[in-house]
Amino acid sequence: MDVTNESTRGNFILLGFSDRPHLERILFVVILIAYLLTLVGNTTIILVSRLDPHLHTPMYFFLTHLSFLDLSFTTSSIPQLLYNLSGRDKTISYTGCAIQLFLFLGLGGVECLLLAVMAYDRFVAVCKPLHYMVIMNPRLCLGLVLMAWGCGVANSLAMSPVTLRLPRCGRHSVDHFLCEMPALIRMACVNTDAIEGTVFVLAVGIVLSPLVFILVSYAYIVRAVLHIQSASGRQKAFNTCGSHLTVVSLFYGNIIYMYMQPGNSSSQDQGKFLTLFYNIVTPLLNPLIYTLRNKEVKGALRRLLLHNRDKKGVRVKSPDRHL
């Protein structure tokens, strides 16, 4: 009998929070509101960064990509979760599960690497301010973003097929609210030590290596900031880097906890809520962090709103000219 993958012929069942039916309605409302706010917040960051000429800098080029990633990352699983929370149907097709797994792994990897790229941008801005625009030229910025996308997608292409091909011996129930790699590995009816070891090695490359790079970059940034004579200069440097550091802490804290402990080693219930946190809460908070702590973004929003108001005023007054 071929046990390589019976699930390819049917659907998966995402158990999610079905063992807590009283919690599902509350989660549906909370997650729906958070998802809508995430869409609005990240779309606003993208539009403001593109429409305001003052924000056509490397920092906001990377921030635009981060917001796009957050939108894609959240949308890869939250609509399916909302559907499952809204009724008794908890199924997802094999194709849908495969796409969800691929996007979740790929976009998560891209975001890890993009945060490292943004740390390098901050390093150049603080430590080599006179050469910033020369070093961070459009060609390099585009190359760094493409590298992040390429490595993230390559990681997903390597791990997704291996995970989906694990023999499951007729098991269709995924003890999670999405097709996440650790949950799918737990479904296997064979020894998974080899694939868990591979996951760990790739996690070191995709998760820990960028984190180490970020920490080293900020060590140099802190040293450079301490040599700045004026208090206002130091405050400006810390404000510039504070938003990025906050985002890094939120994102990496959850990712490391989840993916450096694959398989059965972590609590399944705890894993669901942690996944939910970095899948909806982190993308929701990122626009707020960059808006509330960033005078340039707040100024750009103000200029765009005033510009639109002035346009409306001109349209209202324009008929008087013909009287």
Image (cartoon, grey):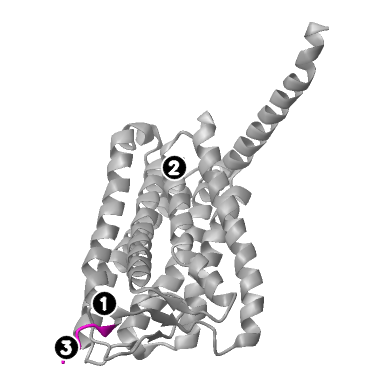
The residue closer to the viewer here, 202 or 80, is 80
Q: Nearer the viewer, mark 1 or mark 3?
A: 3
Q: Disc count in the image?
A: 3
Check if residue 5 falls in the magenta segment. Answer: yes
Q: Decide: few, some or many residues near mark 2? Use Cα within 10 Å; few <14, some 14-19, many ≥20.
A: some
**Occupied quadrant, residue 34:** bottom right
- Side of 94 where 4 appears, left or right: left
Place of residue 79 in the rendered image (x, y in percent of width and height, measured from the top left): 51, 65
The residue closer to the viewer here, 235 or 164, is 164
The amino acid type of the residue labelled 3 equals Asp
Which residue in the protein does label 2 denote? 59
Q: CA distance from mark 2 to mark 3?
A: 52 Å
Which residue in the protein does label 1 denote? 163
The amino acid type of the residue labelled 2 equals Met
Task: Give the position of the C terminus as an image quadrant.
Answer: top right
Q: Which residues are magenta?
A: 1-6
Q: CA distance from mark 1 to mark 3?
A: 17 Å
From the viewer's perspective, is residue 2 above or below residue 123? below
Q: Nearer the viewer, mark 2 or mark 3?
A: 3
